[in-house]
Image (tube, coloured by chain):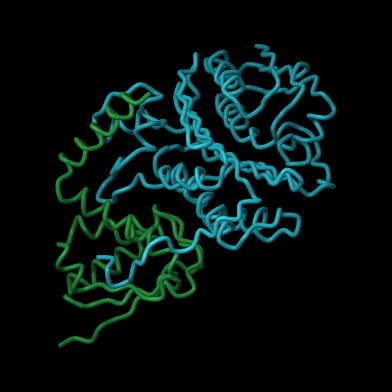
Amino acid sequence: MQKDMKISVFEVVGSPLCVASNDGQKVYERLATAFHAGRRVALSFHNATILTSAFLNAAIGQLYGTFSEEQIRSLLKVEDVEPDDLPLLKRVVDTAKLYFKDPQRFDQAVRETLEDENDDT
Amino acid sequence: MRFALPAIRHDQTSFEALARLHAQTKKCWFDDVEIDMGATTWFEADMCAAFGAILYSLGKNLNTVALTNIPPKVGDILSRNGFLSHYGRVRISDRWRTTISYQRFDVKDDRYFSSYIEDELIHRSEMPEMSPGLLKKFRESIFEIFSNAVWHSRTEMGIFSCGQFFPTRNRIEFTVADLGVGIRQNIRDHIGLDLSPEEAIVWATTGNSTTKRGNVPGGLGLKLLGEFIDLNNGCLQIVSDAGYWHRENKGICTVRLSHPFPGTVINIEINTADTNSYSLTSELNAEDIF
Protein backbone atom coordinates (compact mmCIF):
# COMPACT_ATOMS: atom_id res chain seq x y z
CA MET A 1 0.00 0.00 0.00
CA GLN A 2 1.54 3.30 -1.08
CA LYS A 3 1.58 6.20 1.27
CA ASP A 4 -0.89 9.04 0.76
CA MET A 5 0.71 12.21 -0.43
CA LYS A 6 0.02 15.85 0.26
CA ILE A 7 0.04 18.67 -2.27
CA SER A 8 -0.01 22.24 -1.03
CA VAL A 9 -1.81 24.62 -3.33
CA PHE A 10 0.12 27.51 -1.82
CA GLU A 11 3.40 25.78 -2.59
CA VAL A 12 2.42 25.09 -6.19
CA VAL A 13 1.04 28.57 -6.86
CA GLY A 14 3.60 30.40 -4.73
CA SER A 15 1.02 32.89 -3.55
CA PRO A 16 -2.13 33.01 -1.42
CA LEU A 17 -4.01 34.30 -4.47
CA CYS A 18 -5.17 31.20 -6.32
CA VAL A 19 -6.85 33.04 -9.14
CA ALA A 20 -5.23 32.26 -12.47
CA SER A 21 -6.17 29.40 -14.71
CA ASN A 22 -2.55 28.62 -15.55
CA ASP A 23 -1.77 28.22 -11.85
CA GLY A 24 -4.72 25.85 -11.60
CA GLN A 25 -3.23 23.92 -14.50
CA LYS A 26 -0.03 23.34 -12.48
CA VAL A 27 -2.08 21.87 -9.65
CA TYR A 28 -4.01 19.71 -12.10
CA GLU A 29 -0.81 18.33 -13.62
CA ARG A 30 0.48 17.24 -10.21
CA LEU A 31 -2.84 15.68 -9.30
CA ALA A 32 -3.16 13.87 -12.62
CA THR A 33 0.36 12.48 -12.37
CA ALA A 34 -0.32 11.22 -8.87
CA PHE A 35 -3.66 9.67 -9.85
CA HIS A 36 -2.14 7.91 -12.86
CA ALA A 37 0.34 6.42 -10.41
CA GLY A 38 -2.56 5.33 -8.23
CA ARG A 39 -1.55 7.64 -5.37
CA ARG A 40 -4.09 9.16 -3.03
CA VAL A 41 -3.68 12.89 -2.56
CA ALA A 42 -4.64 15.30 0.18
CA LEU A 43 -4.83 18.67 -1.51
CA SER A 44 -4.22 21.36 1.06
CA PHE A 45 -5.56 24.89 0.65
CA HIS A 46 -3.73 26.09 3.74
CA ASN A 47 -2.84 29.82 3.33
CA ALA A 48 -4.82 30.14 0.09
CA THR A 49 -6.84 33.27 0.74
CA ILE A 50 -8.59 33.86 -2.59
CA LEU A 51 -9.90 31.21 -4.96
CA THR A 52 -11.60 31.81 -8.29
CA SER A 53 -13.70 29.52 -10.43
CA ALA A 54 -11.10 29.86 -13.20
CA PHE A 55 -8.40 28.46 -10.92
CA LEU A 56 -10.59 25.67 -9.55
CA ASN A 57 -11.92 24.69 -12.97
CA ALA A 58 -8.38 24.17 -14.19
CA ALA A 59 -7.08 22.54 -11.00
CA ILE A 60 -9.98 20.29 -10.16
CA GLY A 61 -12.83 20.63 -12.68
CA GLN A 62 -10.81 19.19 -15.52
CA LEU A 63 -10.00 16.07 -13.52
CA TYR A 64 -13.51 14.88 -14.42
CA GLY A 65 -12.51 14.82 -18.07
CA THR A 66 -9.74 12.33 -17.34
CA PHE A 67 -10.79 10.36 -14.28
CA SER A 68 -14.09 8.84 -13.21
CA GLU A 69 -16.05 10.23 -10.29
CA GLU A 70 -15.26 7.05 -8.36
CA GLN A 71 -11.54 7.44 -8.96
CA ILE A 72 -11.59 11.08 -7.89
CA ARG A 73 -13.66 10.31 -4.83
CA SER A 74 -11.28 7.59 -3.75
CA LEU A 75 -8.01 9.35 -4.63
CA LEU A 76 -8.62 12.98 -3.71
CA LYS A 77 -9.49 14.78 -0.56
CA VAL A 78 -9.26 18.46 0.18
CA GLU A 79 -7.99 19.95 3.41
CA ASP A 80 -7.88 23.36 5.05
CA VAL A 81 -10.49 24.88 2.75
CA GLU A 82 -12.11 27.95 4.27
CA PRO A 83 -15.76 27.12 4.95
CA ASP A 84 -16.95 29.98 2.77
CA ASP A 85 -14.89 28.64 -0.15
CA LEU A 86 -16.53 25.22 -0.06
CA PRO A 87 -19.70 26.29 -1.95
CA LEU A 88 -17.55 27.56 -4.85
CA LEU A 89 -15.52 24.35 -4.93
CA LYS A 90 -18.70 22.28 -4.86
CA ARG A 91 -20.18 24.32 -7.68
CA VAL A 92 -17.09 23.90 -9.84
CA VAL A 93 -17.17 20.15 -9.22
CA ASP A 94 -20.89 19.83 -9.97
CA THR A 95 -20.54 21.85 -13.19
CA ALA A 96 -17.59 19.73 -14.31
CA LYS A 97 -19.44 16.49 -13.56
CA LEU A 98 -22.42 17.64 -15.56
CA TYR A 99 -20.31 18.79 -18.46
CA PHE A 100 -18.12 15.74 -18.77
CA LYS A 101 -20.96 13.31 -18.23
CA ASP A 102 -22.70 14.33 -21.40
CA PRO A 103 -21.41 17.45 -23.15
CA GLN A 104 -24.13 17.40 -25.80
CA ARG A 105 -26.91 17.17 -23.26
CA PHE A 106 -25.20 19.91 -21.26
CA ASP A 107 -25.13 22.22 -24.28
CA GLN A 108 -28.75 21.38 -24.99
CA ALA A 109 -29.70 22.31 -21.42
CA VAL A 110 -27.90 25.60 -21.85
CA ARG A 111 -29.77 26.27 -25.11
CA GLU A 112 -33.06 25.58 -23.34
CA THR A 113 -32.07 27.92 -20.51
CA LEU A 114 -31.43 30.64 -23.04
CA GLU A 115 -34.78 30.07 -24.74
CA ASP A 116 -36.51 30.28 -21.35
CA GLU A 117 -34.69 33.55 -20.64
CA ASN A 118 -35.83 34.95 -23.96
CA ASP A 119 -39.42 33.90 -23.27
CA ASP A 120 -39.27 35.76 -19.97
CA THR A 121 -38.01 39.04 -21.43
CA MET B 1 -9.50 62.12 -38.62
CA ARG B 2 -11.25 64.00 -35.82
CA PHE B 3 -13.78 62.59 -33.36
CA ALA B 4 -15.78 64.65 -30.88
CA LEU B 5 -16.15 62.71 -27.65
CA PRO B 6 -19.22 63.41 -25.50
CA ALA B 7 -19.42 63.03 -21.70
CA ILE B 8 -18.57 59.48 -20.62
CA ARG B 9 -20.57 57.93 -17.82
CA HIS B 10 -21.59 54.42 -16.84
CA ASP B 11 -24.42 54.05 -19.26
CA GLN B 12 -25.46 52.72 -22.59
CA THR B 13 -25.09 56.12 -24.27
CA SER B 14 -21.44 56.32 -23.27
CA PHE B 15 -20.70 52.80 -24.45
CA GLU B 16 -22.43 53.75 -27.70
CA ALA B 17 -20.10 56.73 -28.01
CA LEU B 18 -16.99 54.61 -27.44
CA ALA B 19 -18.19 51.99 -29.91
CA ARG B 20 -18.83 54.78 -32.43
CA LEU B 21 -15.29 56.04 -31.88
CA HIS B 22 -14.02 52.60 -32.75
CA ALA B 23 -16.30 52.29 -35.79
CA GLN B 24 -15.14 55.62 -37.19
CA THR B 25 -11.45 55.05 -36.62
CA LYS B 26 -10.93 51.32 -37.10
CA LYS B 27 -9.74 51.74 -40.68
CA CYS B 28 -7.24 54.46 -39.79
CA TRP B 29 -3.67 53.49 -40.51
CA PHE B 30 -0.67 55.82 -40.16
CA ASP B 31 -3.22 58.56 -39.55
CA ASP B 32 -3.42 61.47 -37.13
CA VAL B 33 -6.45 60.84 -34.93
CA GLU B 34 -7.67 63.78 -32.89
CA ILE B 35 -10.11 63.05 -30.09
CA ASP B 36 -11.72 66.40 -29.36
CA MET B 37 -12.81 66.35 -25.74
CA GLY B 38 -14.21 69.85 -25.69
CA ALA B 39 -17.70 68.42 -25.13
CA THR B 40 -16.52 65.79 -22.65
CA THR B 41 -17.99 67.54 -19.65
CA TRP B 42 -17.61 64.47 -17.45
CA PHE B 43 -15.56 61.28 -17.56
CA GLU B 44 -16.15 58.44 -15.11
CA ALA B 45 -12.58 57.52 -14.21
CA ASP B 46 -12.94 53.75 -14.50
CA MET B 47 -14.25 54.12 -18.07
CA CYS B 48 -10.64 54.89 -18.97
CA ALA B 49 -10.28 51.11 -19.29
CA ALA B 50 -12.70 50.97 -22.23
CA PHE B 51 -11.48 54.25 -23.74
CA GLY B 52 -7.86 53.23 -23.34
CA ALA B 53 -8.49 49.90 -25.06
CA ILE B 54 -9.82 51.65 -28.15
CA LEU B 55 -6.97 54.18 -28.17
CA TYR B 56 -4.45 51.35 -27.78
CA SER B 57 -5.86 49.61 -30.85
CA LEU B 58 -5.45 52.90 -32.73
CA GLY B 59 -1.83 53.08 -31.66
CA LYS B 60 -1.32 49.48 -32.74
CA ASN B 61 -2.31 50.60 -36.24
CA LEU B 62 0.47 53.18 -36.02
CA ASN B 63 -1.86 56.13 -35.73
CA THR B 64 -0.84 59.19 -33.77
CA VAL B 65 -3.52 59.88 -31.18
CA ALA B 66 -4.02 63.36 -29.71
CA LEU B 67 -6.53 64.21 -27.01
CA THR B 68 -7.43 67.87 -27.39
CA ASN B 69 -9.52 70.51 -25.60
CA ILE B 70 -9.73 68.46 -22.43
CA PRO B 71 -11.78 70.37 -19.84
CA PRO B 72 -9.63 71.06 -16.75
CA LYS B 73 -11.83 69.00 -14.42
CA VAL B 74 -11.73 65.98 -16.73
CA GLY B 75 -8.02 66.47 -17.33
CA ASP B 76 -7.49 66.44 -13.59
CA ILE B 77 -9.34 63.12 -13.17
CA LEU B 78 -7.54 61.49 -16.08
CA SER B 79 -4.14 62.76 -14.94
CA ARG B 80 -4.57 61.57 -11.38
CA ASN B 81 -5.25 57.98 -12.40
CA GLY B 82 -2.33 57.94 -14.83
CA PHE B 83 -4.41 57.68 -17.98
CA LEU B 84 -3.13 60.87 -19.60
CA SER B 85 0.46 59.82 -18.93
CA HIS B 86 -0.05 57.53 -21.92
CA TYR B 87 -0.89 60.58 -24.04
CA GLY B 88 1.81 63.05 -23.19
CA ARG B 89 0.79 64.50 -19.85
CA VAL B 90 2.53 64.21 -16.52
CA ARG B 91 0.75 62.26 -13.83
CA ILE B 92 -0.40 64.49 -11.00
CA SER B 93 -0.70 63.58 -7.38
CA ASP B 94 -3.99 62.01 -6.34
CA ARG B 95 -4.58 64.25 -3.36
CA TRP B 96 -7.86 62.58 -2.44
CA ARG B 97 -6.29 59.15 -2.88
CA THR B 98 -9.41 57.70 -4.41
CA THR B 99 -8.13 56.58 -7.79
CA ILE B 100 -7.31 53.06 -8.86
CA SER B 101 -4.67 53.52 -11.54
CA TYR B 102 -5.28 52.93 -15.21
CA GLN B 103 -3.17 49.98 -16.30
CA ARG B 104 -2.70 47.69 -19.25
CA PHE B 105 -1.75 44.07 -18.62
CA ASP B 106 -0.67 41.30 -20.90
CA VAL B 107 -2.70 38.13 -20.52
CA LYS B 108 0.25 36.43 -18.85
CA ASP B 109 0.52 39.21 -16.26
CA ASP B 110 -1.80 37.57 -13.76
CA ARG B 111 0.78 37.94 -10.95
CA TYR B 112 1.28 41.58 -11.81
CA PHE B 113 -2.48 42.07 -11.87
CA SER B 114 -2.75 40.43 -8.45
CA SER B 115 -0.15 42.81 -7.03
CA TYR B 116 -1.94 45.76 -8.63
CA ILE B 117 -5.24 44.78 -7.01
CA GLU B 118 -3.64 44.21 -3.63
CA ASP B 119 -1.70 47.49 -3.75
CA GLU B 120 -4.35 49.68 -5.36
CA LEU B 121 -7.44 48.27 -3.74
CA ILE B 122 -6.89 46.13 -0.72
CA HIS B 123 -3.99 47.58 1.23
CA ARG B 124 -5.09 51.19 1.18
CA SER B 125 -6.22 53.05 4.20
CA GLU B 126 -8.48 55.29 2.10
CA MET B 127 -10.62 52.34 1.04
CA PRO B 128 -14.19 52.54 2.24
CA GLU B 129 -14.59 50.27 5.20
CA MET B 130 -16.00 46.90 4.22
CA SER B 131 -16.89 43.83 6.22
CA PRO B 132 -14.28 41.04 5.87
CA GLY B 133 -16.82 38.89 4.03
CA LEU B 134 -17.61 41.64 1.54
CA LEU B 135 -13.95 42.44 1.00
CA LYS B 136 -13.25 38.80 0.21
CA LYS B 137 -16.18 38.60 -2.23
CA PHE B 138 -15.06 41.84 -3.81
CA ARG B 139 -11.52 40.58 -4.35
CA GLU B 140 -12.82 37.32 -5.75
CA SER B 141 -15.08 39.23 -8.13
CA ILE B 142 -12.25 41.36 -9.46
CA PHE B 143 -10.12 38.30 -10.07
CA GLU B 144 -13.05 36.50 -11.69
CA ILE B 145 -13.39 39.42 -14.11
CA PHE B 146 -9.68 39.37 -14.98
CA SER B 147 -9.60 35.57 -15.31
CA ASN B 148 -12.66 35.75 -17.51
CA ALA B 149 -10.92 38.26 -19.79
CA VAL B 150 -7.77 36.15 -19.94
CA TRP B 151 -9.67 32.95 -20.60
CA HIS B 152 -12.23 34.08 -23.11
CA SER B 153 -10.81 37.00 -25.00
CA ARG B 154 -7.89 35.28 -26.72
CA THR B 155 -6.47 38.77 -27.05
CA GLU B 156 -2.88 39.65 -27.77
CA MET B 157 -3.42 43.32 -27.12
CA GLY B 158 -3.82 43.06 -23.42
CA ILE B 159 -6.33 43.78 -20.74
CA PHE B 160 -7.09 47.28 -19.50
CA SER B 161 -8.32 48.18 -16.06
CA CYS B 162 -9.13 51.25 -14.05
CA GLY B 163 -11.23 52.16 -11.04
CA GLN B 164 -12.31 54.81 -8.62
CA PHE B 165 -13.73 54.77 -5.15
CA PHE B 166 -16.16 57.13 -3.52
CA PRO B 167 -15.86 56.96 0.28
CA THR B 168 -18.80 59.24 0.98
CA ARG B 169 -21.11 57.44 -1.47
CA ASN B 170 -19.93 54.00 -0.30
CA ARG B 171 -19.19 52.94 -3.86
CA ILE B 172 -16.29 51.42 -5.76
CA GLU B 173 -16.37 51.37 -9.53
CA PHE B 174 -14.03 49.14 -11.44
CA THR B 175 -13.79 48.32 -15.12
CA VAL B 176 -11.86 45.73 -17.09
CA ALA B 177 -11.76 45.85 -20.89
CA ASP B 178 -10.15 43.62 -23.46
CA LEU B 179 -9.70 43.75 -27.21
CA GLY B 180 -10.47 40.09 -27.70
CA VAL B 181 -12.91 38.10 -29.79
CA GLY B 182 -15.91 38.94 -27.64
CA ILE B 183 -18.43 36.68 -25.96
CA ARG B 184 -20.52 36.10 -29.08
CA GLN B 185 -17.61 34.88 -31.19
CA ASN B 186 -16.32 32.78 -28.33
CA ILE B 187 -19.65 30.95 -28.04
CA ARG B 188 -19.84 30.53 -31.80
CA ASP B 189 -16.32 29.06 -31.96
CA HIS B 190 -16.62 26.73 -29.00
CA ILE B 191 -20.27 25.76 -28.82
CA GLY B 192 -21.43 26.39 -32.37
CA LEU B 193 -24.30 28.57 -31.19
CA ASP B 194 -24.96 31.59 -33.38
CA LEU B 195 -26.47 34.13 -31.02
CA SER B 196 -27.10 37.83 -31.29
CA PRO B 197 -24.53 39.93 -29.36
CA GLU B 198 -26.91 40.60 -26.47
CA GLU B 199 -28.17 37.00 -26.37
CA ALA B 200 -24.56 35.88 -26.14
CA ILE B 201 -24.04 37.91 -22.95
CA VAL B 202 -27.27 36.51 -21.50
CA TRP B 203 -26.03 33.03 -22.35
CA ALA B 204 -22.65 33.61 -20.73
CA THR B 205 -24.21 34.92 -17.53
CA THR B 206 -26.93 32.31 -17.19
CA GLY B 207 -27.36 28.75 -16.02
CA ASN B 208 -24.73 26.17 -16.72
CA SER B 209 -23.12 27.79 -19.71
CA THR B 210 -19.51 26.95 -20.39
CA THR B 211 -17.29 27.68 -23.32
CA LYS B 212 -15.06 24.77 -22.50
CA ARG B 213 -11.65 25.02 -24.06
CA GLY B 214 -9.45 21.94 -24.18
CA ASN B 215 -10.38 19.88 -21.19
CA VAL B 216 -11.08 22.68 -18.78
CA PRO B 217 -14.68 23.57 -18.06
CA GLY B 218 -15.31 27.22 -17.49
CA GLY B 219 -17.95 29.87 -17.52
CA LEU B 220 -18.86 30.23 -13.85
CA GLY B 221 -17.17 33.57 -13.30
CA LEU B 222 -19.78 35.87 -14.81
CA LYS B 223 -22.64 34.06 -13.09
CA LEU B 224 -20.94 34.33 -9.72
CA LEU B 225 -20.45 38.02 -10.33
CA GLY B 226 -24.11 38.53 -11.14
CA GLU B 227 -25.21 36.69 -8.01
CA PHE B 228 -22.85 38.75 -5.87
CA ILE B 229 -24.09 42.01 -7.38
CA ASP B 230 -27.69 41.08 -6.62
CA LEU B 231 -26.86 40.46 -2.96
CA ASN B 232 -24.68 43.53 -2.73
CA ASN B 233 -27.15 45.93 -4.37
CA GLY B 234 -24.43 46.89 -6.78
CA CYS B 235 -24.49 47.11 -10.52
CA LEU B 236 -22.86 45.11 -13.29
CA GLN B 237 -22.60 46.12 -16.94
CA ILE B 238 -21.17 44.06 -19.77
CA VAL B 239 -20.54 45.24 -23.30
CA SER B 240 -19.31 42.74 -25.83
CA ASP B 241 -19.50 43.06 -29.58
CA ALA B 242 -22.71 45.08 -30.09
CA GLY B 243 -24.39 43.69 -26.99
CA TYR B 244 -25.07 45.83 -23.92
CA TRP B 245 -26.19 44.07 -20.72
CA HIS B 246 -27.02 45.73 -17.42
CA ARG B 247 -27.85 44.05 -14.11
CA GLU B 248 -29.06 46.07 -11.16
CA ASN B 249 -31.69 45.55 -8.43
CA LYS B 250 -31.98 41.91 -9.57
CA GLY B 251 -33.20 43.08 -12.96
CA ILE B 252 -31.48 42.65 -16.29
CA CYS B 253 -31.81 44.75 -19.40
CA THR B 254 -30.15 44.18 -22.74
CA VAL B 255 -29.79 46.49 -25.71
CA ARG B 256 -28.19 46.21 -29.14
CA LEU B 257 -25.61 48.93 -29.67
CA SER B 258 -25.46 50.57 -33.07
CA HIS B 259 -21.77 49.69 -33.41
CA PRO B 260 -19.77 46.84 -31.88
CA PHE B 261 -17.17 47.36 -29.20
CA PRO B 262 -13.94 45.65 -30.34
CA GLY B 263 -13.83 43.23 -27.41
CA THR B 264 -15.50 43.03 -24.02
CA VAL B 265 -15.93 45.50 -21.18
CA ILE B 266 -17.05 44.51 -17.71
CA ASN B 267 -17.94 47.28 -15.31
CA ILE B 268 -18.74 46.52 -11.69
CA GLU B 269 -20.09 48.93 -9.10
CA ILE B 270 -19.91 47.73 -5.52
CA ASN B 271 -21.89 48.99 -2.58
CA THR B 272 -19.27 49.14 0.18
CA ALA B 273 -21.83 49.75 2.92
CA ASP B 274 -23.21 46.24 2.37
CA THR B 275 -23.46 44.38 5.67
CA ASN B 276 -24.34 40.93 4.29
CA SER B 277 -22.16 38.36 5.97
CA TYR B 278 -21.29 36.33 2.83
CA SER B 279 -20.43 33.54 5.19
CA LEU B 280 -21.14 29.89 4.66
CA THR B 281 -24.56 29.56 3.13
CA SER B 282 -24.78 25.79 3.26
CA GLU B 283 -23.78 22.97 5.54
CA LEU B 284 -21.19 21.66 3.09
CA ASN B 285 -18.51 19.39 4.35
CA ALA B 286 -15.14 18.94 2.63
CA GLU B 287 -15.84 15.20 2.42
CA ASP B 288 -19.01 15.79 0.41
CA ILE B 289 -17.41 17.75 -2.39
CA PHE B 290 -16.55 15.00 -4.85
x then y, percent, for residue B73: 83, 30
Q: Residue at x 35, y 65 (%)?
A: A27
| Residue B281: quadrant of the picture | bottom left
Q: Nearer the viewer, residue B219 or A1?
A: B219
x then y, percent, for residue B87: 72, 31
Q: Nearer the viewer, residue B189 or B287?
A: B287
Horizontally, is A111 left or right of B145 in the view?
left
Horizontally, is A65 left or right of A30 in the view?
left
Horizontally, is B268 left or right of B88 in the view?
left
Q: Relative to residue B114, is residue B84 depicted above or below?
A: above
Q: Relative to residue B82, is residue A95 depicted above or below?
A: below
Q: Residue at x 25, y 50 (%)?
A: B215
Q: Relative to residue A28, is residue B142 depicted above or below?
A: above
Q: Residue at x 57, y 56 (%)?
A: B134
Q: How many discs mark residues in the rendered view?
A: 0
Horizontally, is B233 left or right of B44 in the view?
left
> Among the chains, which one is green?
A
Can you say which quadrant of the picture contains the N terminus of chain A? bottom left
x then y, percent, for residue A69: 17, 63
x then y, percent, for residue A35: 20, 71
Can you say which quadrant of the picture contains the C terminus of chain A? top left
Q: Colour of chain B?
A: cyan
Q: Residue at x 72, y 58 (%)?
A: B124
